[in-house]
Image (spheres, rainbow, N blue to C red):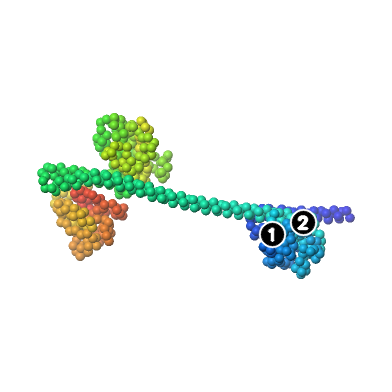
Amino acid sequence: MDRKLASERGAEQKALAARWSIATEAMEALAGARSLEAITHVLRAFARRAVGADGIAVVLRDEDQCHYIAEDSMEPLWAGQRFPASSCVSGWAMENNRTAVIPDVFDDERVPVEAYRTTFVRSMVMVPIGGVEPIAALGAYWSEFAQPTDNEIALLEALARAASTALENGRLFASLEALNEQLERRVRERTAELERSQDSLRQVQKLDMLGQLTGHVAHDFNNLLMPIVGGLDLILSGKRTPESIERHATIAMQAAESAQTLVQRLLTFARRQPLTATAVDLPDLLGGMGALLASTLGPRIALSVDLQPLLPPVRADAHQLEVALLNLAVNGRDAMPDGGALSIRAEARQSRLPSALAPGRYVCLTVSDTGAGMTPAVRAAAMEPFFTTKPSGHGTGLGLSMVHGLAAQLGGTVEIDSVVGQGTSVRLWLPVERTPAERPDPPVVEEGAKARSGRVLLVDDNDLVRNSTREMLVEMGYEVVDTDRAERALGMIESGDRPDILITDHIMPGMTGVELALRLRADHPQIALLIISGYEGVDLIAPDITRLSKPFRQNHLQACIAAARAQAA
């Protein structure tokens, strides 16, 4: 008898241990639940087995009703149904925040007997879920009249407490998510507000820059227009000798060429200067500039050039790079009024590059002087347009900004190191060109009547430019027919009136000069093509069509005509 009793107790303990194991698994699952739906799913999966019940139900408080939202039962109970909270056991448990233990459902005033009479339920336990103010309840049902054991009640209450904790955690996480969303919304709103403020600031800065640009350019151009207008006025007065006419014309031409240089600097600063980027051999370029640099610096400044052996070619516009180096040399000279030394060094680099550069191979071209140096404030503003420390009338303030614009347009950058009293070093970083530098054959210049003979069709919608160019061409010996529209020029050619040379402006109403040139190159390849451009849209011009930038002189026009005729031959 003792052996049988011991065996029964052993089986009970094993069954109890198994139930607690199931309950532990359920509580671990509830620890990760963040919603009522997830909590309900866990309770349906584990609660009935954990307490050894014939059925369980999860009841949700819905104002003054109890909503049976889920069940796991040997027979259907009340899933999906609602009952008044005042007349059901779950309502009592939630209202009183106490566990209801009922050994006999037909002998307890809290039980609506008629609702249970048609079911298998004979005893039950109902546990509230939700802490201080329960919002749900977990019920367990048995098909026999009996007092639920302490372990069954303890297991059910443990599951209810775990579900309550999960609900509270869910609330906290929902609150945190709402707070995060609110913070993110505020950050987005603040970011948008800051962006609008920055846009407004940039607009103000642009307007300020435009005002400075307009003022400086107007000042410089008025200074340049004065000798042009004054000289031409004196020439047109008819009271001048041939010698004075030549003198005034020479002064006017010098002023016009200075204006052209100023425009080029402005375009380079704005990174809009049309560049002919090719492989440039720095030793050759600096060798060709030696005499110019020496005369620019003067006898009191020692010039030294130190180039790395086997220096690779850089990708640059040779002419613009010469202008940039000359600007740096002039800045160095002006920083050394009592004399000093200026050095030009170059080395290829692939590592320890400035952060502004993309990975790759570059040549670092450094121009250093032993002059007065710059203060931190001057160094920070040195590359701003029109910033200059020189006296009024001695410099445009575009030198370093032009160098910076050129470097950026070529895919490089500029750095400045300077110490007051110790001098300045400007490092110009230029990308290495993989294609080796070519040494072009000297152009064949046509001479005599053959060079200046032929029929030219001139197209330009600007009357003043067209008339001026026509006079140049006539003076050079060409027969000239002109029109202001590309469509008219095309019609003349298609009707049989074909010139030897077409000279056309680029930007015009209707058909552009490039469109006209491309049409003729396909249909009439024997016609030489020359496109003239002031600037706008110059990047759209096909690189294999000869082009000439405004303003130009007669010898420039003749050289470009020769190149165009050689290309068409």
Q: Residue at x 26, y 53 (%)?
A: 533
Label 2, on which residue? 153
Is residue 70 in view from this perspective? no
Residue 114 pos. (x, y %): 77, 69
Q: Secondary structure at mark 1?
A: strand
Q: Is residue 102 above or below residue 201?
A: below
Q: Residue at x 13, y 43 (%)?
A: 244
In terms of depth relative to the viewer, which is nearer, 389 or 498? 389
Give the quarter of the image for residue 257: top left
Q: Quadrant of the C terminus?
A: bottom left
Read off the residue under disc 1.
Answer: 136
What's the amino acid at mark 2?
Answer: Ile
Up-down: is 400 above or below 515? above
C-alpha span from label 1 to label 2: 17 Å
Along the line of sight, the residue nearer the viewer: 286 or 407: 407
Residue 521 or residue 503, whichever sits in front: 503
Image quarter for residue 420? top left
- On the picture, is 248 further left or further right than 487? left
Q: Position of residue 317 (x, y in %)?
A: 30, 45
Q: Which residue shows up at 31% across the image and 53% down it?
A: 539
For mark 1, does the 10 Å Cα neighbourhood hold few (<14), some (14 to 19), or many (20 or more) residues? many
Q: At which x and y percent is residue 181?
A: 55, 53
Q: Is residue 71 positioned above or below 25 on the image?
A: below
The reply to whether callout 1 and callout 2 are in contact (CB within 8 Å) is no
Q: Position of residue 544 (x, y in %)?
A: 28, 53
Amino acid type, callout 1: Ala
Residue 177 appears left or right of 444: right
